[in-house]
Image (cartoon, rainbow, N blue to C red):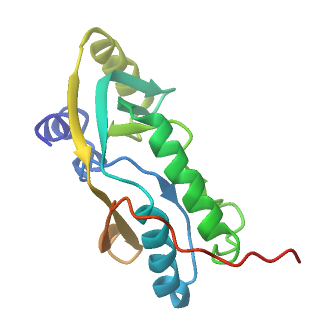
């Protein structure tokens, strides 16, 4: 957060002040399905044991974002795929151009929506820096976007318990 605060001041970006996080899935769903979505996510997360996430150096998405690379990608990709399977079958809202996003490249965003000149300058600085850290992910949060506040609210804390998933009956048609 200390680095994010510095970036927010340096680049006049309130977006940099968001809580540090690694997005595993982002989607829009009908609010009436919230309880079912939470249960699907809890069930998918329950199959995972807490795991180590390593943060290693910086990267960037062209002309708008600077991030820290995340080296636990395979576990996070598997979790994202499990969430996609659990949620997408029936609960994703048809929002036209706002397609669901599931993790393809694990990263921890430091600052995004930079102006083009700021991005070039930030990229030059961060390319020369090194960063290494690690932590154990014991669970995840479900955040809900509140358009009227232009902010996220935490809806649920979901632990990684490592228990076997419940058997499910699959349908063919």
Residue at 26% of width from left, 54% of height from top? 138
Res. 74 in view: yes
Above-or-below relation of 26 to 173: above
Q: Whole-percent x and y of residue 37? A: 51, 78
User: With 11 as the anchor, is 76 left or right in this view?
Assistant: right
> In the image shown, does 80 or 5 lie closer to the viewer?
80
- Quarter holding the C terminus is bottom right
| Residue drawn where x is 57% and y is 57% of the image | 82
Residue 30 picture location, percent across and down:
57, 83
Q: Is residue 133 above or below residue 88?
A: above
Q: As drawn, which residue projects farthest toward the bottom?
A: 32
| Horizontal and vertical percent position of residue 160 | 34, 60
Q: From this view, report whether residue 122 is shown above or below residue 80.
A: above
Question: Extreme left residue here?
Answer: 2
Q: How many marks?
A: 0
Splitting the image into 4 quarters, where does residue 33 fall?
Answer: bottom right
Q: Residue at x 49, y 65 (%)?
A: 44
* Left or right relative to 60: residue 173: right
Q: Residue at x 60, y 69 (%)?
A: 87
Please indicate, yes or no, whether residue 111 appears anywhere in the rendered image. Answer: no
Q: Quadrant of the N terminus?
A: top left
């Amino acid at each position: 957060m200390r680095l994010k605060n510095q970036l927010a001041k340096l680049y006049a970006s309130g977006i940099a002040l968001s809580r540090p996080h690694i997005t595993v899935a982002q989607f829009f769903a009908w609010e009436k399905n919230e309880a079912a979505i939470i249960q699907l996510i809890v069930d998918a997360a329950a199959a995972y044991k807490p795991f180590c996430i390593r943060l290693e150096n910086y990267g960037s998405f062209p002309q708008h974002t600077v991030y820290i690379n995340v080296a636990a990608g395979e576990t996070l990709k598997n979790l994202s795929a499990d969430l996609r399977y659990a949620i997408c079958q029936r609960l994703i809202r048809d929002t036209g151009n706002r397609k669901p996003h599931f993790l393809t490249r694990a990263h921890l965003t430091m600052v995004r929506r930079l102006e083009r000149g700021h991005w070039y300058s930030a990229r030059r600085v961060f390319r020369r820096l090194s960063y290494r850290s690690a932590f154990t992910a014991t669970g995840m949060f479900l955040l809900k976007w509140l358009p009227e506040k232009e902010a996220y609210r935490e809806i649920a804390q979901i632990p990684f318990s490592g228990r076997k998933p419940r058997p499910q009956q699959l349908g063919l048609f």
